[in-house]
Amino acid sequence: LSPDELEFYQGQVDKIDEVAPSAEAVESLERQFNRKARYEELAQLSQSVSAAFNDEGGIVEILGQCVKPVQELAELDDHAQARAARVEGLIIECEDLAGEYARFMDVEDAEDVSYEDIEAKMNHWLELKRRYGPSVEQVLAKREALAKKIALQSDIKGALSCLEAEAASLEQEAGMLAKALAKKRTQAGASLAKKVEHLLGSLGFKKARFSIEITEEAKLRDTGNVRCTFLFAPNVGQPLLPLSKIASSGETARVMLALKTVLAEVDETPLLIFDEVDANVGGEIGAQVGKRLKALAASHQVLCVTHLPQVAAQAEAHFVVTKKQTKQTTQVAIESLHEAQEGRVVELARMLGDRSSASALKHAEELLGV
């Protein structure tokens, strides 16, 4: 901080301390202000009450007229003695009240602080509220923040030492949390890999192996200190290698389908897109792929680019994309088929090999369940 900034911050702290060193001080100020502002009204009312007690014909005089007959009654009947004592006590209480109301404003008059001083202090407080927040807590929080800046500037070395100690403590805590997280990931990874490997068998990988490798790293990141690598071996005799290096795009898509299926209940990704998920698979495996995609669509929005009718038939919505080329241009068109059952049957028959074949049309209807 520059000297000017330091002076400015200290000035702000001093201004707050003048008015609002605590919530109790603000409450006292507001009470004083309200009392001073209504001094004349309070004085007039208190004197009126005192006069009602003490003036001629007032409460004390009227009660005094009762004393003699009350005492005589008590002398004649023992049962009236208790009531006589109550009347005498009532007179004493009224006299005390009359005196207290008469002196009600004496305390106010004895205070050294004038109304002008309190009004100025109140205006100062209202300005602080306007600047730093409507509540006492917000103003005091601002004061604490400013005081911390001043203290930090006054003891840079001490502040740095504290921050370094805090950083070391946080790093140690983060390391312990990362270690616990790595242990949970190792356990979860083994369980996940087993489920995915089992599911891959129904997606055309009868002998495939799938594993999740957890590797500890020296650098601690916001996600922990381990790296998770998906290892995949699609065929017998092949070593487990990173999925990104060994699998084709179609194989990767089917592995992702297996992963997303296993994780369907906890995966919050709203939209999943599969391209070439049916690459190099036949009709039987394609039907399994289609069923898995349909099940996944119960919890996600799934878009799939496919050339297999067994997959397309499982979709809730079916679009066909066509491309036409002329000498000068290329045109791409998309057509919705799911609203017209007949058009969808014809398209599935085309995907089966012959849109005009009766057997292909019948097979298409069977795929759609119509």
Image: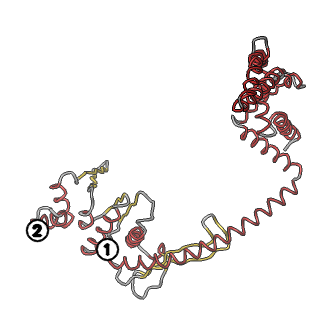
Quadrant position of the C terminus in the picture = bottom left
Furthest toward the left, the residue is 358
Whole-percent x, y for residue 108 in the image: 84, 24
Q: Amino acid at mark 1?
A: Asn
* Front one among 125 and 148: 125
| Residue 294 seen in the figure | yes
The disc at residue 280 is 1
Left or right for 312, reference 258: left
Whole-percent x, y for residue 247 in the image: 43, 75
Quadrant position of the N terminus in the picture = top right
Whole-percent x, y for residue 27 in the image: 76, 34
* Front one among 18 and 173: 18
* Front one among 96 and 242: 96
The image shows a total of numbered marks equal to 2
How crowded is the residue under tag 2: few (<14 C-alpha within 10 Å), some, or many (20+)?
Answer: few
Q: Quadrant of residue 298?
A: bottom left
Residue at point 77% right, 62% down? 166
Whole-percent x, y for residue 186 in the image: 55, 77
Above or below: residue 259 compared with residue 79: below
Q: Residues at badges 1 and 2 in contact (C-beta under 8 Å)?
A: no
Residue at point 53% right, 78% down? 187
Q: Amino acid at mark 2?
A: Ser
Q: Quadrant of residue 352?
A: bottom left
Helix, strand, or loop for circle 2? helix
Q: Quadrant of residue 292?
A: bottom left
Residue at point 50% right, 75% down? 188
The disc at residue 359 is 2
